[in-house]
Image (spheres, rainbow, N blue to C red):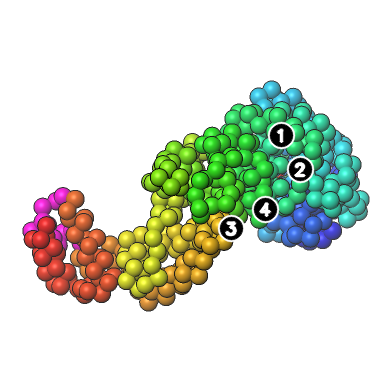
Amino acid sequence: MIIPKSVSEIIELLEREGFEAYVVGGCVRDSIMGIPAHDYDIATSALPSDTKRVFGFCKVVETGIKHGTVTVLYKGSCVEITTFRIDGDYLDGRHPQNVEFSGNLYDDLSRRDFTINGIAYSHTRGFSDPFGGARDILSKTIRCIGDPEKRFSEDALRILRALRFSAVLGFEIEERTKAALIAHKSDIRRVSRERVFSELKRLLCGKYAEGVITEFAEVLSEIIPELKAEIGYDQGSKYHNRTLLEHTAAAVGAASEEIRLRLAMLYHDIGKPLCRTTDENGECHYYDHANISAKIADESLRALKCDNELRESVCEIIKYHDMPIEPTEKFVRRQLSRRGYGLFCDIIRAEIADNSAKIPKAAERIPMLKETLSLAGKINSEQPGLSLHKLAINGNDLKSFIPPSPVMGEILSKLLEEVADETVENEKAALIARAREIYKSK
Ligand code: ATP
Ligand code: MG
């Protein structure tokens, strides 16, 4: 296994002082899979106080001292070094009551979640893989270390971690592990929303998210209860040949792996079951479902402690995900002035993902949507960031003849559209004259 020089030097320094030290967890798994590791965690028999002493010559931060973790800043890299440990009893389904340090690597690997994450390696001692993690990596299997029932009841976040690894790596969850995670799904409610949301985001951005959402919708409904109504839901529409859940999962999978878009696709139709009507031909319609879905997403993302910026952009995309699109300069200019470049492009990307998840006929719209997207790029590069603050006047310039009222905002927006359409020049006198005209006609 290839380890960065700084990391192998840290291991050597600990070994020279008589301790055992290994790289463990995600970096070993990724390296066996041939994926570049993003960080290297070290496990050692040294106690945190020993580690601090060995690295007395560098900066050492006590990042998780309760769990035996210190972070060493060595030759420009930050490396977490954790003492081998045994986790005490889990009484709350989230955290061990206490942790006990151990001198034994096997103990430390036993407390880890899945076999694929329970492998250690060092240049001098080679691989230590007591639970068959390498075999499971080769057969693409996620399997709990030890008794799955016990492991999920200890820490229900592991349920979502299993789904996340499956969505990111494309691994199957082994049958006993799968049965136990389903049986314990309601325990997810005991886990902090922040930890849940962090795993959900990674799951959604996985290359294999579609399959995981489809297979484990019951589990995800513990986090987003409205998702449950999508399971097996027949949309009664000639544009769809899948259930609402299958369509949603396919739309998530079709969107680029960016969290804004993936979340938007997850929630984009979630309000549909609440606003179904059936016409005389038996065709179902879902008027206003975009707004209702955006509202559900807003509440759900608040509950998940999503940051405001992400929540707001996701809800805006959902709100407009089925708006009519025209591949014309006029339309695109207006949209850019109304919504801004970023949001407008996201809306079109969402429509592309949505249409890729319907009947093949719907996909015929995709070239037109792509054309609109490139038109937006072209206009934006010529006239970047056309928005109210780029207008050559503001409310102050109009207040001598327009009293403060919502009309002021409407007039400014109208002026912006006209500048975008190039029917009025973005110049102070011209804009004031035009504002007077609009105000008079109101
Ligand atoms: P990545 O860094 O790509 O998310 P990872 O496997 O390194 O993957 P981390 O969250 O960084 O995941 O955790 C490091 C290691 O700690 C894991 O590989 C696993 O061995 C162990 N681990 C993490 N979370 C848990 C948990 N909830 N229960 C048991 N072991 C865990
Ligand atoms: Mg990691």
**Disc 2 + disc 1, Cβ < 8 Å:** yes
Q: Residues within 10 Å of mark 1 (few under 14, many from 20)?
A: many
For numbered disc 3, what is the local secondary structure? helix
3 or 44, which lies in front? Answer: 3
**Disc 4 crowd, CA 10 A, few/some/many (<14, 14-19, 20+):** many
Per the model, the C-alpha gap separating discs 4 and 3 is 10 Å
Instruction: Compare marks 2 and 1 and give the one earlier in the sequence.
Output: 2
Q: Is residue 403 on the magenta stretch?
A: yes
Residue at screen point 76% across, 46% down: 172
Q: Earlier in the sequence, mark 1 or mark 4?
A: 1
* Nearer-N-terminus badge (4/3): 4
Question: Mark number for residue 254?
Answer: 3
Relative image position of residue 422 (x, y in whole percent): 25, 74
Q: CA distance from mark 4 to mark 2?
A: 13 Å
Report the quarter where the N terminus lies.
Answer: bottom right
Between 160 and 1, the one nearer to me in the picture: 160
The answer to whether the residue bearing label 3 lies less than 8 angstroms from the nearest atom of ligand 1 is: no
Amino acid at dot 2: Ile
Q: Mark 4 sits on what residue?
A: 208
Please indicate whether residue 209 sits to the left or right of residue 248 in the image.
Answer: right
Residue 173's tag is: 2
Which range of residues does the magenta coloring cover? 394-405
In the displayed structure, 435 sits above or below 232; it is below
The percent position of residue 190, horizontal first and vertical second, equals 60, 28
Q: Is residue 366 left or right of residue 442?
A: right
Residue found 73% across the figure and 52% down from its top: 170
Q: Where does residue 257 sit, x and y in percent of width and height? A: 59, 57
Residue type indicated by callout 1: Leu
Pointer 1 residue? 181
Q: Position of residue 46 (x, y in %)?
A: 81, 40
**Which element type, helix, strand or loop, lies under badge 4?**
loop
